[in-house]
Image (spheres, rainbow, N blue to C red):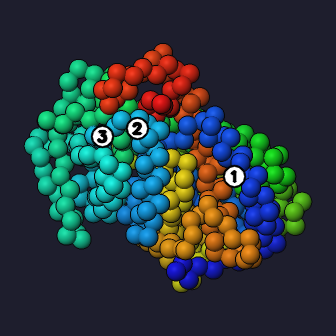
Amino acid sequence: MVPNATSAISGPLLELERQFLDQSTLIERWFREQWYEHAPPFYGSVDLRNAGFKLAPVDMNLFPGGFNNLDPVFMPLCVQAAQAAVERMCACSHRLLLVPESHTRNQFYLKNIARLAEILRLTGLEVRLGSLLPEITEPTLLTLADGGSLMLEPLVREGNRLGLAGFNPCAILLNNDLSGGVPAILQGLGGQCLIPPLHAGWHVRRKSRHAAVYERVVQTFSEEIGIDPWRISPAFRVCSGINFHERAGEECLTNQVDALLTSTRRKYRELGIEEEPFVAVKADAGTYGMGVMMVKDASEIVGLNRRQRNKMAVVKEGLAVGEVIIQEGVRTFETIGGAAAEPVVYMMDHYVVGGFYRVHTARGSDENLNAPGMEFRSLAFDTSCCTPDCRQEPDSMPNRLYTYGVVARLALLAASIEIEETSPMPDNVYCGCGCGTVFPESRLHPDGCRP
């Protein structure tokens, strides 16, 4: 059953859920048409915030690292969706190289890799793990806290193909977000499907670009089903030329924060929402909740102390923050055991395969929950997020989860379009399974080959 999750839901979200239920046939047909035009990423996860009057994604991850947090009951859904993703990549594929992050001491992340590898093996793939760590010079067995194990092996590059000693994979799946850039060994690969593509990594990708594409997707979707797009889309602004240590870009940041807060207050008054608006200032590239602060007044930007500046100045891999996105803050009214919680939805191909709640006992409803001290509570429910039950109330758990699944899939669709629009595609790509098939650019999956 779902953990003791409660939501202070007001009328508008119930109205939104009712509209999604009433128009589920139209919604699913609309998605089907979109996926015909745009190939989905291999996998992804979306952090959602439910404010009662607004439900919106606040982060879209193309290298999800929490498969270990999914309840085991989701395994059949994961395997079925992964099978579809593999078939979309190339039905001939039978060997896959999984390249993880270099978190050899992070047991939670290693359990994620173990779960992901298990899912992929159940699709009929031979899966082995290749490490980017220079110290991995021979097969190295890592013991997991739950008694399991993982074998990491050194990568071997031969021409334009990447593999392991005695292992020539059809495709390479990255579970490494490339925040620190693209290692030389991954550059110039031309004979295999590389998924997600290199330009989906945080060395290139920007949250603001994704947000702009998401706005377009939501506008089209909202016109189709007749809802106010503001209900499911957070407004945003962007500032570049930022240096928190030297206070560079402070005027731009202050002005943009003030402008977004002012427009949000205006919208709140229009809708009769009696809440104090806030914004999230985030590094425009990066993950793990680093480089994030919540702001309720533009004066707080000028008043940052040294510790706060140091926290905002760098993100993962110690990279300096030079660009930020100012995103409309969305409260979470969901709680588990009295602690603030937010749902995280996982997808493979274009299917919702499960999710969990991120919970933080020391953070409030208007704070960043993706921070040290967070916990994860798995969601287990009788039907998938794609199966509403029109016989029940709009806020019943199957229908609440369906609503979450719709918004998460909108973010996934935006990621698909984002990848397409930023793709430095060659004219032709050979299928990585060695079958010799050549796929012209017009039929090319953004993650590799598309039969």
* Marks 3/1: CA–CA distance: 31 Å
Which residue occupies 56% across, 65% down? 384
Which residue occupies 54% across, 25% down? 443
Residue 342: give x, y in percent of width and height: 57, 67
Residue 237: give x, y in percent of width and height: 68, 42
Q: Is residue 203 visible?
A: no
Which residue occupies 41% across, 63% down? 75
Residue 402: give x, y in percent of width and height: 65, 64
**Callout 1 crowding tier (Cα within 10 Å): few <14, some 14–19, many ≥20:** few
Q: Is residue 420 visible?
A: yes
Q: Is residue 220 above or below residue 204?
A: below
Secondary structure of the residue carrying tag 1 is: helix
Labels 1, 2: front one: 2
Side of 441 where 298 appears, left or right: right
Q: Quadrant of residue 90?
A: top left
Q: Which is more toward the observer, 268 or 308?
A: 268
Which residue occupies 50% across, 42% down? 41
Which amino acid, by three-letter code, is at mark 3?
Answer: His
**Callout 2 crowding tier (Cα within 10 Å): few <14, some 14–19, many ≥20:** some
Looking at this rendering, what residue extends furthest in the right direction?
Answer: 270
Q: Is residue 444 above or below residue 68?
A: above
Looking at this rendering, what residue extends furthest in the top direction?
Answer: 427
Q: Which residue is mark 3?
A: 94
Which amino acid, by three-letter code, is at mark 2?
Answer: Ala
Q: Which is more toward the observer, 79 or 20?
A: 79
Which amino acid, by three-letter code, is at mark 1?
Answer: Glu
**Callout 3 crowding tier (Cα within 10 Å): few <14, some 14–19, many ≥20:** some
